Every structure is written in structure tokens, then in C-alpha cells.
Amino acid sequence: MFARTERLLLRPSWPEDAQELHRAIDDEGIVRNLARAPWPYRLDDARSFVTASQPILLPNFMLMLRTDGAPRLVGSCGLGEHNGEVELGYWIARPYWGLGFATEAGRAVIRIAHAIGYKKLIAGHFTDNPASGRVLRKLGFKNTGRVEHRHSLGRGQMVASALYEMELSSSDGEDNLMRSAFDPGFNRYLNELRAA
């Protein structure tokens, strides 16, 4: 599955992305804010990530900056499962912090989640990373006021995490609008996935 935004191409990871992924995420300042990434982040970790199979209805995207030359990896954004709910997650490489890429990619992934048919998304951020909370609020997530302790693989410990949620609209007009952002075969593709 692919998507485009004003500045980004969202695409699946490919095996040849391993070195670029490693360069982008091999930063303790990034990994410490993620639940599932180890620290130190090794090239073998990147290889495992880009070759792992993904559930089709929980896509994860490499965020490629569209340029006149070769696209550059700016981060990742996607959907995952947490405690039986669909969770939005993302990270951005340090050179691209503060440029709006997390919000831009997050909006695209929310549209994809809506088109897939999800009615609700959750998200969270470690409480010592308030910048991520600002991104979630810009995306329309509501702070639930709840805090849970999640294990951070990178920190090797439990960390307080603020919980957010977003109800996705189910009006037919908005469903059609969201789906129109995709190629004409997208609805057929989703129907085939649901039937499988």
C-alpha cells in the first residue's frame, strides 16, 4: 500500500532500506521515545524490521521525502495493535524534527485507517516526550487523562505513557471522500482482504 502527501511518499519497507533505516533511527534520542525499538539499534535490527511480514490491515510506512533527486527517509508511521486496539505510531529522524512531517504522515495514515474501516484509533506518548503529545493533538486525538506504564525496549524499563484516542467518522460521504484519495482499485482490494 502506498500514499502520497504534499512532501512525502508513504510506502512499505523494502530489504534494501536496511542501511538507510539504520542511519535514520540509530539515535538514542529517537529510540528512547519508542516502545518497540531496541537500543542500541543495530543494522541487524533494521534488517529484521524491513524483512518482517506485516499484517495487511495494519500497514507501516517508510516516510520518504520526495525530492528532485533520490528520496530520503525521514521516518516511519503506521498502525499496530496494542491491547486489542488499533494504535497509531510514528518516529521522525532528528534532522527532520519540527518540520511537520509527523503531522503530515499521521494525517495520511489516519485516512488509510478510516478507509480500511477502523472506527477508533489509540495513540500514546511517554510523558517525558511532550512534543509527541502536541503532534497527537494536532492530528485530532483526545487525551483520555489516563496514564499507563509501557515497556520501552530502548530504555529497558517501564515508562509512564499518556493515552489518547480518536473516533473515526462513519458517515458515508466521508467514507467515500477518504477512499477517493486512493487508486480506483483500492475498494476492491479492501473487499478482497476482508473476504479472505
Image (cartoon, rainbow, N blue to C red):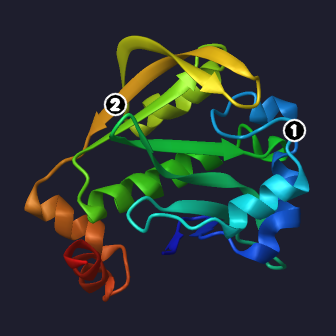
Percent position of residue 74, x then y: 74, 55
- SS for tag 2? strand
Of residue 25 and residue 84, the one placed in the foreground of this image is 84
Amino acid type for the residue under numbered disc 1: Asp
- The residue that appears at 88% across and 64% down in the rendered structure is 19
Name the quadrant of the C terminus. Answer: bottom left
The answer to whether residue 56 is left or right of residue 43 is left
Which residue bears the numbered disc 1? 27
**Looking at the image, residue 149 lies above or below residue 87:** above
Percent position of residue 131, x then y: 63, 25
- The residue that appears at 62% across and 15% down in the rendered structure is 159
The answer to whether residue 161 is left or right of residue 168 is right
Of residue 27 and residue 95, the one placed in the foreground of this image is 27
The answer to which of marks 2 and 1 sits earlier in the sequence is 1
Question: Within 10 Å of the Cα at label 2, are there few (<14), some (14-19), or many (20+) other Cα atoms?
Answer: many
Asked which quadrant contains residue 49, the reply is bottom right
Which residue bears the numbered disc 2? 165
**Looking at the image, residue 82 lies above or below residue 33:** below
* Residue 144 visible here: yes
Percent position of residue 51, x then y: 69, 69
Question: Within 10 Å of the Cα at label 1, are there few (<14), some (14-19), or many (20+) other Cα atoms?
Answer: some
The answer to whether residue 25 is left or right of residue 188 is right
Asked which quadrant contains residue 139, the reply is top left
Of residue 124 and residue 72, the one placed in the foreground of this image is 124
- The residue that appears at 26% across and 53% down in the rendered structure is 118
Mark 2 touches mark 1? (CB < 8 Å): no
Asked which quadrant contains residue 158, the reply is top right
> How far is disc 2 from disc 1 in space, using C-alphas?
28 Å
Amino acid type for the residue under numbered disc 2: Glu
- SS for tag 1? loop
* Residue 71 visible here: no
